[in-house]
Image (tube, rainbow, N blue to C red):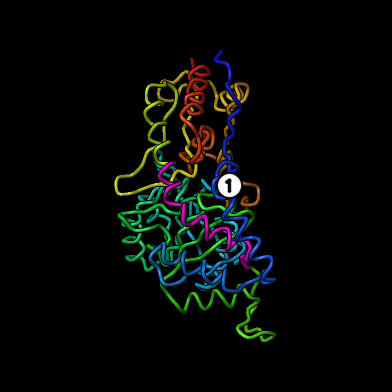
Amino acid sequence: MIQSINSIPAFDNKQQYSTIEAEVSAAVLELLASGRYIGGSVVASFEQQFAAYHGVSQCVTCNSGTDALYLALRALGIGSGDEVITTPFTFIATSEVVSAVGAKPVFVDIDATTYNLDLQQIAAAITPKTKAIIPVHLFGQPVDMTALMDLAKVHNLIVIEDCAQSTGASWAGQRVGSIGHIGCFSFYPTKNLGGCGDGGAITTNDPEIAAKLRVLKEHGSKNRYIHEEIGVNSRLDALQAAILQIKLRYLDSWNNQRRAIAQRYHQLLSQIPGIIPPQELTGGSGVWNQYTILVLSEGRNGSSAKHRDWVRDRLQEQGVSTMIYYPHPLHLQPVYQSLGYRAGQLPVAEQTCNEVLSLPMFPELSQQQQDQVIYALKDCLA
């Protein structure tokens, strides 16, 4: 058995912080001294910069990626009696918000190579009640937005991009979050652009939608103590905006480091039997929030590989931490039993949940650490 040199985390933001510590400390101390902790010029400045980065006219910040999706649905008038098509292979926030506004999530199976929505299956799921599609640019890999927007136009559907894991990714040269009608982002600390706490943002080119979002996130109020509708309290703290403003300047560099690590993973994993490395669509530029392989179940494609969970345990014994995103598909979750989905109905998503394993991925991952991951993986599958 290969002996570990050092323990390798699945994700590590300590090294990243050390490179920008002086800038962050100065910005945080200045903000604390100002006494302006909610709203203010720092938040407004970050919104402008984030909008400019994505080539859109509007950015509205909020307190999480989940709220970004929820507020987007509310602003677009999607609610009771409506249906929203999305993927069963993602974090529950994507479908949870659909249920939260009173609409019905409709799950479509995923593509076996990209793990994203299988666009060929969407048309069959559209009904007169369908109002929107929420594609998820999963693991930082963009959906084919050209094909999706063409489909949405034919059926007069709204497209809400879930960009929680894909800040900085692009399709056909255009940033995700600027292609659909609205884009939703998360600044959770493990994201490519992560804060030091929770946070989210919504991008759009429609000033009316942006204005609606600002009312909804402030208790349904334009003017203090005058409430036009039921809203929520969903603000991005000024402290997070100050930190994100700094990190945004480094984002492209960090994403390029992730791409280089992913390319090296591709090369090193190409000759290991029993696994399938992730694949990118031509036309997309991903940002590798995760690097997720498939550990083939025994018998699939002639594989005699061990079960994914067994491999994960053996890697952990050798000091290599991994993650499983996601072990259970959404359509089979207990909370969605009433929707009537059955095991085997979305087979690709179900199989993928049994085989995915996310290897260590962060911009500062060294070649030595990456070699250790590969050696440990080879040892497990030998």
> Is the residue 178 above or below the residue 6 in the image?
below
Give the total of numbered labels. 1
The quarter of the picture where the N terminus appears is top right
Q: Nearer the viewer, residue 107 or 138?
A: 138
Residue at 53%, 48% in the rendered image? 90
Three-letter code for the amino acid on which mark 1 is drawn: Tyr
Residue at 60%, 42% in the rendered image? 14
The answer, for residue 131, to whether it is visible in the render is no
Residue 24 quadrant: bottom right
Residue 234 x, y percent position in the rendering = 63, 68
In the image, taking residue 265 as reference, residue 62 lies left or right, namely right
* Magenta stretch, main secondary structure class: helix
Secondary-structure class at tag 1? helix
Residue 300 quadrant: top left
Residue 250 x, y percent position in the rendering = 46, 52
Q: Residues within 10 Å of mark 1 (few under 14, many from 20)?
A: some
Residue 83 x, y percent position in the rendering = 50, 63
In the image, taking residue 316 as reference, residue 304 lies left or right, namely left
Q: Nearer the viewer, residue 317 or 71?
A: 317
Residue 177 quadrant: bottom left
Magenta region: 235-257
> Is the residue 56 above or below the residue 2 in the image?
below
Q: Is residue 21 magenta?
A: no
> Is the residue 253 above or below the residue 73 in the image?
above
Q: Is residue 250 magenta?
A: yes
Residue placed furthest toward the top: 1
The answer, for residue 255, to whether it is visible in the render is yes
Q: Nearer the viewer, residue 317 or 146?
A: 317
Residue beneath label 1, please? 17
